Image: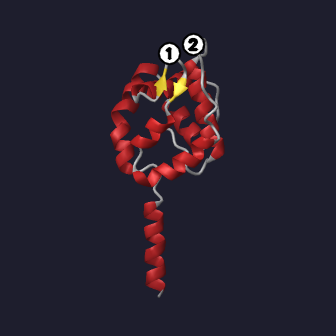
Amino acid sequence: MERSVTFLLLLVCARAEFPTKEFVEQLRPTVEKCEEKTGVDKTLVEQFSKGESMVDDDKLKCYMKCIFVELELLNESNGIFRYEKMLNMLPEDMKSIAYNMGQACVHFIGDQNTDMCQVSYDLHRCWQKKDPQHYFLF
């Protein structure tokens, strides 16, 4: 009985991986491109991802925007974030968590005169506050 419970706990922990290793690897080229393009401090990315710091840094904000733009999730011309497209690109195990995290943050959109780096940062900050346990930033 004890072995069954231990196995079940290990299985639940393994299935609870968020984000999945495969998803992280899939996005690595985009992450590397945006790191190089923006010159973001990787320490700030890690701190933000862990909820340790919500620093107001222009390079960090534009790094977030870069990832959205590269993945075609942010329409720069109208400031609309494509939530449905984001959900469709996620592995099945991640979709419900991401959906729940994002529901509170759908109001973050810009317009033609809005700083899209700031909109991207505000959206990430909202996700981080909504579900710090599952939030991640590469």
Q: Secondary structure at mark 2?
A: loop
Residue 82 horizontal side relative to residue 20, left or right: right
Q: Residue at x 54, y 46 (%)?
A: 99
Kindly identify the amino acid type of the residue bearing the numbered disc 2.
Gln
Label ID, residue 106: none
Kindly identify the amino acid type of the residue bearing the numbered disc 1.
Ser
Residue 57, visible in the rendered structure: yes
Q: Secondary structure at mark 1?
A: loop
Q: Position of residue 115 (x, y in %)?
A: 59, 16
The CA distance from mark 2 to mark 1 is 6 Å
Label ID, residue 77: 1
**Which of 70 and 28 lies nearest the eye of the viewer?**
70
Q: Position of residue 93 (x, y in %)?
A: 44, 55
The answer to whether 106 is drawn above or below residue 117 in the figure is below
Residue 138, visible in the rendered structure: no
To which residue does mark 2 refer? 112
Q: Report which quarter residue 107 is drawn in.
A: top right
